[in-house]
Image (tube, grey):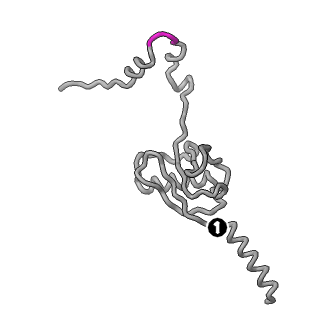
Amino acid sequence: MSSQKRQKKKNNTDNQTAKNSRFLITITVLGSAGPIRFVVKEDDLVAGVIDTALKSYARGGRLPVLGSDANKFLLYCANAGSDALNPLESIGSRGGRNFVLCKKQTHPTMTEGRPEIIGRKGSGSWKAWLNKSLSFKISSH
């Protein structure tokens, strides 16, 4: 093999290695005792990384139980701004190695929430409603 062919093959191998480079990431799950660490490829999608994190978290028997639906979670770069990563972008696109996994905030709709609260403007206070909602009935023996 000529030196020119060897050099071309080496360049192709280097390019392939650069595309498939792997690195260790750390994901902190809000409410959990410690981070999760695993190796990813630079071009892995954020959605896949969230899925892998949830599976790893469940395998470890960690609490609180999170479930397995990756669509209910957001991944944030710990060192960057406050925007969540797009699930369709590659995990290596931001250059971060430390991430935070959070459950998406859900806002109840009229059918899920308490529709009687809406439209009761002026009647009762939100503090009274909150106290009533959080009150516990303790029975005596």
Seen as rendered, the residue at the extreme bottom is 1
Seen as rendered, the residue at the extreme top is 123
Quadrant of residue 6 in the image?
bottom right
Counting from the top left corner in percent of width and height, residue 128 is at 40, 17
For label 1, the crowd category at 10 Å Cα-Cα, with few meaning under 14, some 14 to 19 and many 20 or more, is: few
Task: Tell me where the magenta segment starts and ends, as one range.
Answer: 120-124
Residue at the (55%, 44%) spot, across then down: 73
In what quadrant of the picture does the N terminus appear?
bottom right
In the picture shown, does residue 108 fall above or below 58? above
Give yes or no for residue 39 being in the magenta stretch. Answer: no
Mark 1 = which residue? Answer: 21
In what quadrant of the picture does the C terminus appear?
top left
Quadrant of residue 91 in the image?
bottom right
Amino acid beneath label 1: Ser
Seen as rendered, the residue at the extreme left is 141
Residue 7 located left or right of residue 91: right
In the picture shown, does residue 75 fall above or below 38? above
Residue at the (54%, 46%) spot, across then down: 69
Counting from the top left corner in percent of width and height, residue 101 is at 52, 48
Residue at the (54%, 60%) spot, across then down: 25
Counting from the top left corner in percent of width and height, residue 129 is at 42, 19
Residue at the (52%, 44%) spot, across then down: 102
| Dominant secondary structure of the residues highlighted in magenta in the image | loop
Give yes or no for residue 123 being in the magenta stretch. Answer: yes
Task: Give the secondary structure at mark 1.
Answer: loop
In the picture shown, does residue 54 fall above or below 37? above
The tally of labels here is 1
In the picture shown, does residue 60 fall above or below 118? below
